[in-house]
Amino acid sequence: MEVLFATVVGILTACGVYLLLRARTYPVVLGLTLLSYAVNLFLFASGGLVTGKPPVIAADAAGYTDPLPQALVLTAIVIGFGMTAFLVILALRARVELGSDHVDGRGADR
Amino acid sequence: MNHLVIAPILLPLLCGALSLLFVRRLEALARVLNLAGCILLLPITLWMLLDAGTDHYRVYALGGWPAPFGIVLVADRLSALMLALTSLVALCSLLYALAGELRANPYFHILFQFQILGLNGAFLTGDLFNLFVFFEILLIASYGLLLQGEGAGAARTRATLHYVVLNLAGSALFLIAVGVIYGVTGTLNMADLARQAAQPNPANASLLQAGALLLLVVFMLKAALLPLYFWLPAAYSTAAAPVAALFAIMTKVGVYSILRIFTLIFGAGAGAAAGVAEPWLLPMALLTVALGAIGVLAATSLRLLVSYLVIVSVGTLLAGVGLFTAAGISAALYYLLHTTMITVCLYLLADVIARQRGSNADTLTAGTAVGRPVLTGAMFFLAAIAVAGMPPLSGFLGKLLILEAAVDHRSMPWLWGALLGGGLLGIIALGRAGSVLFWTSAGRPVLTLPALPLAAAMLPLAASPLLVLFAHPVQEYTTAATAQLLLPQGYIDAVLDRPAPSLMEHASPEGMP
């Protein structure tokens, strides 16, 4: 499972960075979204991957999984979602004001 | 537990949230609450400054949860200094804003309060993840603030887009760093992190170092250090003047975070990760000074020039910090006070000049003259002397302290060369800008501004002579703050070795909410 998890995080990060380096705002937004997914998964795994255990210390459970990364991921998801929403609106405004969806506002005629 | 510690966070939160509730029905409320919040913040932070002067760590456990498990706020000398500086900067910027078109914009006032909330939280928190959260609060408020105000148009939107995308990428890096550090140490409390980092655990040492360096990259982005400063000139020079003035404190959040994290957690006692930032910080800072100085020389408008001066000042500041000696950090703290206040003054002054020159605005070309040329010119002259680091104002003293701190350091020729060379280029550029704006420009100004904006711009300028007059007490304070930073054991003990707060507090009537 660790290998699969790491591969997924790696592929998501690679795709996110690739899209982030594109010159159009929409791929950049998508890239940031993918990157934040990768980061959330990474953060989730930072407490160690445990399956089938409760996130609390219980008398009848054999062990527990670290609950803190889950709380951190929740916070990160909420913040990331809000930021993405803002960025989409900003990208739309930039498209209107710059006349192009290029990140530098170039090539309006293309 | 003294509840006043959390007031710098709660006060702007309440003011901002209340104004937001009534934003459609009572537009003036936002303005009133913003002013009231900024004025009230001043005595609170001054009290904290005096209180921290007794070398007492004020630890506030949120919800009464004891330290490694709950989130703590910690007010030490450095935090209190930054808080007081923030409230001063905010008040100066707001007074100027009240004399301009942003006065009637309720969203500016609301975002302004949320910006202060994020800043104060970042300076107070003692938890790494909480630092991330407050970073995000101050960033999202700054995204909104950047877009406020008239003019600029497309250039401003483009600069904001770049700023937002860069900072979102920076936030992703921050989270990766937090994840790595949590994975290695199993804690996010800064004091507990310092303890864990000090334990020899060679298996994960390289991971911890990687986490520390990732954090350094994030903070370098916030502080606008080479190679991550390219967002700053465009964003700051197109923002509305009071917003740019408030943002003078934003780069200092990055500087503060570097100071805090790399003395407390990854300081001298951090075992394998000790001094991990040292090989990077000083060279980067000096290169930033060099490139920033070239930018100053090449700037075509006054606000662009001031923005590059901000980059030079960040480089100078982090050169002092990058020495990682008591003298270097203490000098950097003194310089930080000076440079923040002067930057505020310069942004406001640039706007005063731009508004009076009509279509010439603040471009460095001969054109419409400035109203009240003698007074405005004298202010520009004083601010230029201060920012370039010429005697007798505070810039000279701050730079001298940093130069003096580097005398015995092996990087001395580089540091002296960069700082003095950068200062020379700054003097040339400022001299040229001043003579173009005040001497070769002719004709009547488009409008002569009332006295109020000019007075608001004069307020932060007064900090410079005051910093010289009271150099001794200020320096004593910064020296003591540095001593606290370089001996983090006091901080760690104050946070972790407290008697179980939840039980103690409820037993005494003072602790009841």
Image: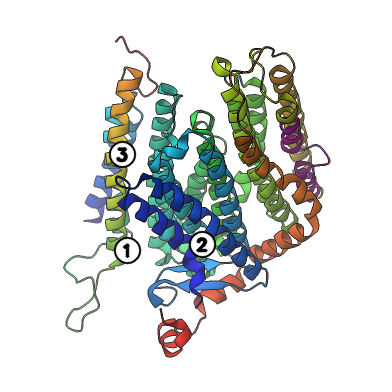
Q: Tell me the element at label 3.
A: helix
Q: Residue B124: which numbered mark, if any?
A: 2
Residue ID for mark 3: A86
User: Tags 3 and 1 in contact by the CB under 8 Å rule?
Assistant: no
Q: Position of residue B327 (x, y in %)?
A: 75, 55
Do the dots labelled 2 and 3 sit on one chain?
no
Q: Tag 3: residue type?
A: Phe
Q: Are marks 2 and 3 in contact (CB under 8 Å)?
A: no
Tell me the distance, in whole angstroms, between the alpha carbons under discs 2 and 3: 27 Å
| First to last magenta residue range | B378-405
Q: Which residue is mark 1?
A: A47
The residue under the point 27% across, 61% down is A70
Question: Which residue is most to the top?
Answer: A109
Of B368 and B287, which appears nearest the observer? B368
Q: Earlier in the sequence, mark 3 or mark 1?
A: 1
Position of residue B372 relative to residue B38, above or below, is: above
Report if the CB atoms under discs 2 and 1 are less than 8 Å apart.
no
